Image (cartoon, helix red, strand yellow):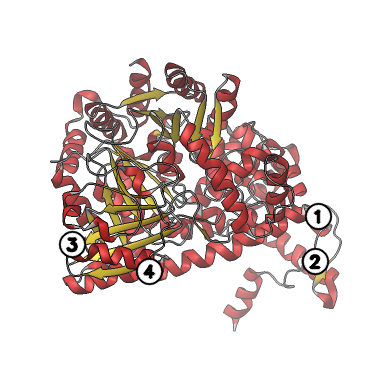
């Protein structure tokens, strides 16, 4: 407690704050936190629904993700099977238990499909995004009882499903979704994922597959 | 790490003669600069976002105590803890205390410049706790026992063959005849080795790029995914960060993230941007049981209310050093502490004292490229000039420099004498140089002419030429 008071005290004295006459500052902070006003949002994502989906896919592909689109949840299994190309060395497969997965016929996916947090050795991780962000081709995943965070990080290959209707134009709109969902409280982890893992630490040469997945495949649903 | 900024001149001379380093530094100038330009050009609103980014940080600093309180309240409401550390020592102590409480043997770490600043690794080792750097660049440096030379590309001073030699030296359990000629094979080897560390670590330490007061979140960005594995797999997540990382809201964080990635690596968005708010929640299948934020001051609060408050806007993108001709020439280690380049030339004297780091603000051509690319528009040359003034006022410069400045000041205050002297000097230098227009030797200017010719000035000064024109 003492250290906190010391640090805050030094900040106040540096800023020449008179605690007895600090109403204006306090009001400014309370108002900004409550209203969280928008700053300039780039026009890039301000598009109609279909164009937004197209931008989302284009931006994701520009950072080495691959993308696909299916009409409804019933087609997810065959899209995954097509992507995996019938390779049964891509197993075990780890998935979340989002209720939207219930309509998926997992028996049509080659390999051993498991639920729960990811483990070392998992080859494929399948997650369902809360939202997509068109301006950068980003998927927003949130942690929760049905969504282990490790699924998007430990497996070699990552597949993320994104409902077309949840693809927002910009980052702020996606944050609005997650903010409203928890009544102002965020889940433990919000992951914004833009392409497969990479590093350019050796001679600035860009290489995919650093610590996270080597490949990222996005399937837009709807 | 020890501060060797006072040896900047020797460090720089050594760096200029280091062929490996000079080869590696070529990657800075040609890589980062072009990538940033392309990303900035592709976003019409980029400069407007920079203006707003500057305002967001300026507003936050003017209300910093209140945003820190709001952030702390929110973290605690979510079941996390915030530890305030006035000094580097307090910060390392706080981290070790948490590790001890959990009987931690191994700690995985994602890249954090604040952890370099507080010398966390050395202290952890001394206390019997093994820190493992997981960012590829930082891992390479850890096995070489070196410090980062760049704030976002820590191993930029190394070449591939050096990394190969280190991996062969350290990864003795792997076949000696394995092929490591491709950078991809080096990456694969590090990935496999570090994967084991992630899975067995007791505590994960990350830094933070931003702390969001509205939601009590720490935001960390990486391209590798190492910060996510570091914070999700172990039982305890410790965020080691500093007080100026606060931003008010998620909307403000959005604006800053847009300028950060573009300025740093020329990406529209880093691969992984992660918001962590408290420990795992009831029913969560994974994530850490405990969430700690170690909030480091270490001299920053003393910058508030001074000329150097602007420096606290810095979001550590590295654009200033990527565009700096001095950094291009000598690299990051020459600066002698954690923060190199123009931002380091301003920040290092603030944090370790101008008496130790006075050379750094002098190691600038004042070309202004750093300020022109800074995403939060920090007037870096102006702040370096403030340090030079401060040095002069405190009599910290060598006698020759003070005498020189004194002589210049004498003439600068007497315009007639100044014009006379500069006129004589310009004519004589021009005469001496002859038709070649360059001088290869000059008394009192050996420091310059030993390495290159001095271009001679025009025979008549600007003032003299102007007068002639006026007369016509």
Residue matched to label 1: B445
Rendered image quadrant of residue B393:
top right
Distance from label 1 to label 4 (Cα)?
57 Å
Residue matched to label 4: A61
Tell me the chain of label 3: A
Visible residue check, residue A88: yes
Answer few, some or many: residues within 10 Å of disc 3's Cα (few below 14, many 20 plus, some between 14 and 19): some
Asked if the residue under mark 3 is in contact with the one under mark 1, i.e. CB atoms within 8 Å, the reply is: no
Distance from label 3 to label 4 (Cα)?
22 Å
Discs 1 and 2 share one subunit: yes
Q: Nearer the viewer, mark 1 or mark 4?
A: 4
Residue matched to label 2: B429
Tell me the chain of label 2: B
Expressed as whole percent of the image width and height from the top left, the position of residue B433 reads: 83, 70
Q: Earlier in the sequence, mark 3 or mark 4?
A: 4
Tell me the chain of label 4: A
């Amino acid at each position: 407690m003492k250290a906190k008071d010391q640090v805050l005290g030094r900040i106040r004295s540096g800023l020449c704050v008179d605690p007895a006459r600090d109403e204006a500052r306090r009001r400014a902070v309370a108002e900004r936190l409550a209203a969280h006003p928008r700053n300039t949002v780039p026009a890039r994502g301000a598009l109609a629904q279909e164009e937004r989906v197209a931008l989302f896919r284009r931006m994701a592909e520009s950072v080495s993700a691959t993308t696909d689109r299916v009409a409804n949840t019933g087609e997810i299994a065959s899209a995954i099977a097509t992507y995996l190309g019938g390779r049964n060395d891509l197993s075990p497969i780890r998935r979340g238990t989002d209720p939207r997965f219930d309509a998926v016929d997992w028996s049509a996916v080659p390999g051993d499909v498991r639920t729960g947090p990811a483990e070392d050795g998992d080859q494929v991780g399948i997650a369902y995004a809360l939202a997509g962000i068109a301006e950068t081709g980003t998927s927003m995943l949130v942690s929760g009882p049905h969504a282990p965070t490790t699924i998007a990080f430990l497996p070699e290959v990552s597949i993320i499903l994104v409902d077309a209707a949840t693809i927002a134009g910009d980052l702020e709109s996606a944050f609005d979704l997650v903010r409203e969902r928890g009544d102002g409280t965020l889940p433990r982890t919000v992951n914004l994922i833009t392409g497969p893992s990479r590093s350019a630490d050796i001679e600035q040469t860009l290489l995919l597959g650093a610590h996270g997945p080597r490949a990222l495949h996005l399937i837009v649903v709807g | 790490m020890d501060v060797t900024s006072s040896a900047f001149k020797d460090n720089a001379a050594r760096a200029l003669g280091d062929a490996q380093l000079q080869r590696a530094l070529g990657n800075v100038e040609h890589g980062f600069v072009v990538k940033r330009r392309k990303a900035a050009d592709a976003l019409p609103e980029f400069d407007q976002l920079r203006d707003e980014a500057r305002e967001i940080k300026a507003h936050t600093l003017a209300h910093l105590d209140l945003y820190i309180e709001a952030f702390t309240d929110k973290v605690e409401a979510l079941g996390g803890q915030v530890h305030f550390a006035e000094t580097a020592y307090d910060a390392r102590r706080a981290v070790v205390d948490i590790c001890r409480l959990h009987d931690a043997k191994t700690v995985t770490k994602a890249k954090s410049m604040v952890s370099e600043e507080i010398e966390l690794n050395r202290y952890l080792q001394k206390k019997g706790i093994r820190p493992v750097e997981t960012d590829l660049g930082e891992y390479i440096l850890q096995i070489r026992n070196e410090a980062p030379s760049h704030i976002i590309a820590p191993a930029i001073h190394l070449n591939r063959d050096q990394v190969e030699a280190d991996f062969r030296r350290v990864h003795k359990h792997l076949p000696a005849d394995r092929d490591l000629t491709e950078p991809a094979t080096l990456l694969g080897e590090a990935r496999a080795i570090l994967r084991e560390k992630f899975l067995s670590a007791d505590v994960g330490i990350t830094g933070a790029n931003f702390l969001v007061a509205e939601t009590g979140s720490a935001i960390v960005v990486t391209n590798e995914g190492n910060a996510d594995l570091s914070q999700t797999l172990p039982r305890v997540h410790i965020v080691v960060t500093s007080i100026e990382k606060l931003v008010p809201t998620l909307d403000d964080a959005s604006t800053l993230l847009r300028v950060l990635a573009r300025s740093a690596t020329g990406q529209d968005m880093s691969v992984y941007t992660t918001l962590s708010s408290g420990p795992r929640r009831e029913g969560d299948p994974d994530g850490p049981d405990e969430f700690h934020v170690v909030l480091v001051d270490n001299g920053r609060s003393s910058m508030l209310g001074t000329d150097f408050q602007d420096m606290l806007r810095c979001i550590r993108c590295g654009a200033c050093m990527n565009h700096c001709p001095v950094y291009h020439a000598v690299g990051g280690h020459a600066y002698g502490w954690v923060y190199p380049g123009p931002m380091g030339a301003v920040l290092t004297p603030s944090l370790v004292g101008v008496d130790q780091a006075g050379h750094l603000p002098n190691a600038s051509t004042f070309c202004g490229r750093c300020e022109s690319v800074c995403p939060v528009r920090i007037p870096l040359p102006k702040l370096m000039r403030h340090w030079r003034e401060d040095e002069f006022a405190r009599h910290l410069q060598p006698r020759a420099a003070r005498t020189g400045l004194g002589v210049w000041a004498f003439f600068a205050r007497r315009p007639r004498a100044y014009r006379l002297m500069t006129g004589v000097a310009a004519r004589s230098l021009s005469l001496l140089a002859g038709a070649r227009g360059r001088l290869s030797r000059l008394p009192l200017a050996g420091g310059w002419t030993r390495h290159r010719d001095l271009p001679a000035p025009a025979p008549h000064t600007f003032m003299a030429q102007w007068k002639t024109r006026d007369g016509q």
